[in-house]
Image (cartoon, rainbow, N blue to C red):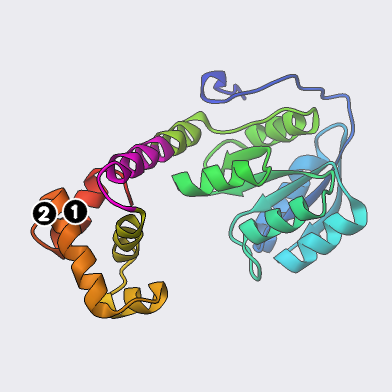
C-alpha cells in the first residue's frame, strides 16, 4: 500500500534490522490485531502485550524493547505519565503513540517528553509498520498536519502573552491567566495571598489598560489575542 510521503517527516528505514516491540492497548481485539500485524513483518518481534499503563511500564522496564507502541487511551496512568516515567528513568526504548486524535498541546507535550512517532488510527496498518521501522532506525515519524497546528498554536500563545506583557504588570498578567482558568475573585485572592478588594483594584486597572468593559470582555480579549 502506498504511503503519502508528503504528509510525514521520514528518515532512513532499515527493514532488515530486527525490532523488538512492546504493544500497549486496552482493547484486546486491537491488541491482537497489532500483534498479528507485526508477526507478519520480517524482523519484527513482539515480546509483550499490555492492557494498562502499569503493565506497560513493567514490561518496558523488564524487556527494554526497541520500540513501545502506546495507545494514548489507557486505564490507570495516562500516556503523559508513562512518557514522563520512561524519560526520568532514561530507558533506551523509543515510543510511538497510537491515537484517534491528539490536540495541539498534546502533540507538543509528546514531542517534549521524547515521543519519536505519532500515528493516527485512521491510517493504514502499514503506516504504523513504517513508523516503527523509522523510529527504530533513529528517526522521527510525526503527522505534519498535527505538528504544524501545534507550532502555530504555541506561536500564537507566545505572541499573545508578549502583547499583554507589554501592557500589563506581572501580577495583572497572573490575574488574567487565573480568570481565563475560570477562577472567581475570592479564589484568585486565596491563591495569590491578597484580599478580594485588591483583586478588584487590579481588575479595574486591567479593564482600563485593555479598554474592555468587564470580565466577559476580558475573556474574549484574551482568547482573541492568543493568551489562552
Q: Where is residue 25 in the image (x, y as percent from the top left)?
A: 68, 58
Q: Is mark 2 on a helix, strand or loop?
A: loop
Q: Which is more toward the observer, 133 or 187?
A: 187
Q: Give the range drawn in magenta.
A: 153-169
Can you tell which mark lies on residue 179? none
Residue 226: image quadrant is top left
Q: Is residue 141 visible?
A: yes
Q: Residue at x 70, y 30 (%)?
A: 130
Q: x and y percent of residue 206 in the render?
A: 20, 57
Q: Are marks 2 and 1 in contact (CB under 8 Å)?
A: yes
Going 53% across and 43% down the picture, which residue do you hit?
A: 107
Query: Residue at the location (66% across, 33% down)?
Result: 126
Marked residue nearer the N-terminal end (2 or 1)? 2
**Residue 4 occupies quadrant:** top right
Q: Where is mark 1, residue-wise?
A: 220
Instruction: Tell me where residue 228 appears, x and y as whole percent.
Output: 33, 52
**Residue 208 position in % (x across, y down):** 12, 54
Would residue 116 appear left or right of 48 to someone viewing this image?
left
Query: Quarter-wise, where is residue 82 in the image?
Result: bottom right
> Which residue does the numbered mark 2 point to in the structure image?
212
Q: Distance between the residues labelled 2 and 1?
A: 9 Å
In the picture, measured across the screen, residue 5 lies left or right of residue 113, that is left
**Would residue 201 be found to the left or right of residue 79 on screen?**
left
Q: Nearest the camera: 58 or 14?
A: 58
What kind of secondary structure does the magenta stretch mostly adopt? helix
Picture residue at 68% right of the left edge, 33% below the top: 131
Report the front residue among 6 and 225. Answer: 225
Amino acid at each position: 500500500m502506498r504511503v503519502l510521503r508528503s504528509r510525514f517527516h521520514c528518515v532512513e528505514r532499515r527493514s532488515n534490522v530486527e525490532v523488538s516491540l512492546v504493544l500497549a492497548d486496552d482493547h484486546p481485539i486491537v491488541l491482537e490485531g497489532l500483534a498479528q500485524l507485526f508477526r507478519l513483518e520480517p524482523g519484527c518481534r513482539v515480546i509483550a502485550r499490555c492492557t494498562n499503563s502499569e503493565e506497560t511500564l513493567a514490561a518496558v522496564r523488564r524487556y527494554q524493547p526497541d520500540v513501545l507502541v502506546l495507545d494514548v487511551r489507557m486505564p490507570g496512568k495516562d500516556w503523559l505519565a508513562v512518557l514522563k516515567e520512561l524519560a526520568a528513568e532514561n530507558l533506551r526504548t523509543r515510543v510511538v503513540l497510537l491515537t484517534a486524535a491528539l490536540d495541539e498541546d498534546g502533540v507538543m507535550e509528546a514531542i517534549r517528553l521524547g515521543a519519536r512517532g505519532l500515528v493516527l488510527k485512521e491510517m493504514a496498518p502499514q503506516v504504523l509498520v513504517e513508523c516503527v521501522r523509522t523510529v527504530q532506525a533513529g528517526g522521527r515519524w510525526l503527522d505534519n498536519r498535527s505538528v504544524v497546528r501545534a507550532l502555530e498554536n504555541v506561536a500564537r500563545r507566545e505572541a499573545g502573552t508578549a502583547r499583554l506583557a507589554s501592557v500589563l504588570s506581572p501580577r495583572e498578567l497572573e490575574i488574567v491567566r487565573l480568570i481565563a482558568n475560570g477562577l472567581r475573585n475570592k479564589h484568585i485572592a486565596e491563591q495569590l495571598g491578597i484580599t478580594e478588594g485588591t483583586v478588584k483594584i487590579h481588575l479595574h486597572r486591567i479593564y482600563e489598560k485593555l479598554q474592555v468593559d468587564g470580565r466577559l470582555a476580558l475573556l474574549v480579549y484574551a482568547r482573541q489575542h492568543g493568551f489562552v
